[in-house]
């Protein structure tokens, strides 16, 4: 893909549609993801299922597929008896599956540019105990940087268009991630998980977004895996503090009941909201948990008129 087709250039020109929840699509297809590796388990067990899920989102109108590496870490794979060499192969495979889906989408007649974002979830995702929605792990910024850097090096070497530093609950972890992506040669976006006007760890979004303002690697900042109602204020804050394009991909609006291990409530994310977010400065817009291809198709139609 040429420089003129880069994601950064596309953001300067207009709005880019992200995909929806990968796990939601896989679960809808009948796959059991009740595992500490979550969707990353299928990298080893059923990789073509992941490619099919990416393809479904491209076909629905997404311009960007986010890889299945959110919960894929050397430490998480080690808990399953998977060594570092094999873990690196699986991380690389996550990007290749996104590329495969893009090739198949183009073969099916999709002519618009398609990108692959390599997902890097927070430290808490590896713990698989809900810590990614709390932050404050008791680790220093240096320790978190040492955790993230090796995985990011492998993902960057696999050749994605962008690194998705996503669902970050804590400004300290964001600082570690910003250090960890330096010199990798791949642009990145930084996306916090938030509640109201604060990170999940409780820091004001002004302070959290300000960390990315001086980072050359960051092409967008924003929020994901949050309530749709939290997006509007976050967009305005991100634009004011950083002046960067804003990335937003909230959940459906349903809430996760950890005790019952089930979703509760009703969806509140509607295509009408995305046009307001775009007016405020959002440039990468999609969905996260419980947002499927049908909803992405609605979002794409709303954004493309």
Image (spheres, rainbow, N blue to C red):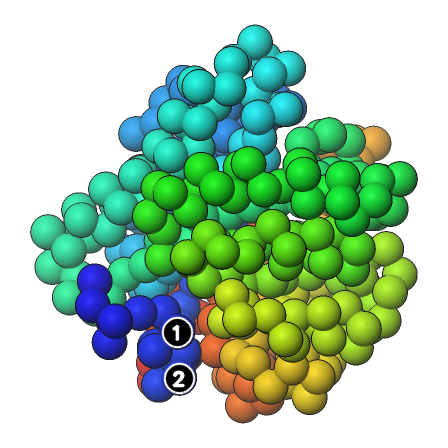
Asked if 173 appears above or below 62 in the picture, the reply is: above
The image quarter in which residue 148 lies: top right
Image coordinates for residue 299, horizontal then vertical, percent: 44, 70
**Residue at figure coordinates x 79%, y 55% from the top left:** 172
**In the shown orientation, is residue 56 left or right of residue 36?**
left
**In the shown orientation, is residue 270 left or right of residue 179?**
left
**Residue at figure coordinates x 56%, y 45% from the top left:** 120
**Nearer to us in this view, 39 or 11:** 11
Image coordinates for residue 264, horizontal then vertical, percent: 73, 46
**Residue at figure coordinates x 23%, y 42% from the top left:** 100
**Residue at figure coordinates x 55%, y 57% from the top left:** 182
* Mark 1 closeness class: few <14, some 14–19, many ≥20 residues within 10 Å: some
For the N terminus, the quadrant is bottom left
Q: Which disc is residue 8 wearing?
A: 1
Disc count in the image? 2
Residue under numbered circle 2: 12
Query: Can the viewer see residue 271 in this picture?
Result: no
Image coordinates for residue 247, horizontal then vertical, percent: 55, 70
* Mark 2 closeness class: few <14, some 14–19, many ≥20 residues within 10 Å: few
For the C terminus, the quadrant is bottom left
The image quarter in which residue 211 lies: bottom right
Asked if 142 appears above or below 15 in the picture, the reply is: above
Query: Can the viewer see residue 144 in this picture?
Result: yes
- State the residue lying farthest toward the top: 81
Q: Secondary structure at mark 1?
A: helix
Image coordinates for residue 14, horizontal then vertical, percent: 38, 84
Q: Are marks 1 and 2 in contact (CB under 8 Å)?
A: yes
Q: Secondary structure at mark 2?
A: helix
**Nearer to us in this view, 63 or 145:** 145
Q: CA distance from mark 1 to mark 2?
A: 6 Å
């Amino acid at each position: 893909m040429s420089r003129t087709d880069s994601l950064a250039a596309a953001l300067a020109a207009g709005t880019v549609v992200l995909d929806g929840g990968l796990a939601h699509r896989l679960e809808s297809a009948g796959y059991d993801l009740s595992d500490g590796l979550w969707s990353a388990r299928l990298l080893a067990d059923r990789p073509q299922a992941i490619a099919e899920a990416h393809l479904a989102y491209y076909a629905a109108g997404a311009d960007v597929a986010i890889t299945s590496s959110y919960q894929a870490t050397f430490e998480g794979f080690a808990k399953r008896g998977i060594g570092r060499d094999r873990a690196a192969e699986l991380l690389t495979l996550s990007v290749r599956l996104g590329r495969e889906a893009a090739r198949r989408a183009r073969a099916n007649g999709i002519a618009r540019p398609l990108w692959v974002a390599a997902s890097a979830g927070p430290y808490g995702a590896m713990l698989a105990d809900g810590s990614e929605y709390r932050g404050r792990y008791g680790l220093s910024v240096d320790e978190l940087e040492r955790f993230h850097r090796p995985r990011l090096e492998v993902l960057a070497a696999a050749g994605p268009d962008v690194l998705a530093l996503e669902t970050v609950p804590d400004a300290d972890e964001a600082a570690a991630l910003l250090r960890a992506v330096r010199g990798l040669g791949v642009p990145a976006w930084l996306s916090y998980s938030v509640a109201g006007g604060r990170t999940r760890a409780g820091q004001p979004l002004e302070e959290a977004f300000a960390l990315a303002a001086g980072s050359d690697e960051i092409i967008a900042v924003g929020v994901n895996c949050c309530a749709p109602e939290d997006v509007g204020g976050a967009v305005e804050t991100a634009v004011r503090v950083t002046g960067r394009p804003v990335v937003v991909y909230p959940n459906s609006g349903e809430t996760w009941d950890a005790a019952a291990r089930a979703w509760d409530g009703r969806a509140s994310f509607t295509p009408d909201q995305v046009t307001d977010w775009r007016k405020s400065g959002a440039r990468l817009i999609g969905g996260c948990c419980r947002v499927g291809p049908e909803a992405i198709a609605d979002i794409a139609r709303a954004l493309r008129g």
